[in-house]
């Protein structure tokens, strides 16, 4: 089991930045791929970015490439999402998730943190 708690959300003006954090507890954090997802009101949850166990491989959705950066600190059991040049369409609840080795999908999810970008 892995417990995930997000923080760092808030209200920001368009063009601004936020850094989200996701603190993990439970089984060895470094054994999990980590991902960020978001869900806007009335829309389906969408993938934002993911990072490999050691952090050497990352992948982001086209909508956030060049603006968002995912990173992790395994010593602190934390994954981050640095969000720059925010747009109103980035407004959503952002959740982190953990995927264990061999799993097809993400096994564990946090509760999410609200990000609101005003125009």
Image: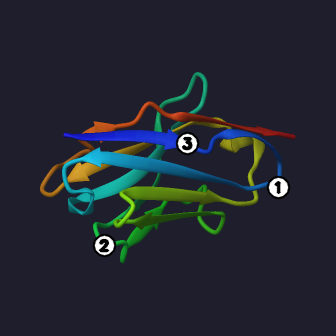
Q: CA gap, disc 3 to disc 1? A: 20 Å
Q: CA gap, disc 1 to disc 2? A: 31 Å
Q: Quadrant of the rendered structure where residue 3 is?
A: top left
Provide the residue designation for mark 1: 15
Provide the residue designation for mark 3: 7
Q: CA gap, disc 3 to disc 2? A: 22 Å
Q: Secondary structure at mark 2?
A: loop
Q: Nearer the viewer, residue 64 or 109?
A: 109
Q: Secondary structure at mark 3?
A: strand
Q: Secondary structure at mark 1?
A: loop
Image x and y of residue 118, in percent? 83, 38
Q: Quadrant of the N terminus?
A: top left
Task: Please tell me which residue is depicted at 67% across the width and 44% down the height of the picture.
Answer: 90
Q: Which mark is residue 82?
A: none
Question: Mark 3 or mark 2, which has the lower sequence index?
Answer: 3
Left or right of 11, for residue 9: left
Left or right of 94, for residue 101: left
Mark 1 and 2 residues: CB-CB less than 8 Å, in contact? no
Task: Please tell me which residue is depicted at 83% across the width and 48% down the height of the picture.
Answer: 14
Image x and y of residue 72, in percent? 42, 65
Mark 1, mark 2: which one is toward the viewer?
2
Q: Residues within 10 Å of mark 3 (few under 14, many from 20)?
A: some
Provide the residue designation for mark 2: 54
């Amino acid at each position: 089991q892995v417990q995930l708690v997000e923080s760092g959300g808030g209200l920001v003006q368009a063009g601004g930045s936020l850094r989200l954090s996701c603190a993990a507890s439970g089984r060895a954090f470094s054994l999990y791929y980590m991902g960020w997802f978001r869900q806007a009101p009335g829309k389906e949850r969408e993938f934002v970015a993911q990072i490999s166990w050691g952090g050497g491989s990352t992948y982001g959705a086209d909508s956030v490439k060049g603006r968002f950066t995912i990173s992790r600190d395994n010593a602190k059991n934390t994954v981050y999402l640095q969000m720059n040049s925010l747009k109103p369409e980035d407004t959503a609840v952002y959740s982190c998730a953990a995927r264990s080795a061999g799993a097809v999908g993400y096994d564990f999810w946090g509760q999410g943190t609200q990000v609101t970008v005003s125009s």
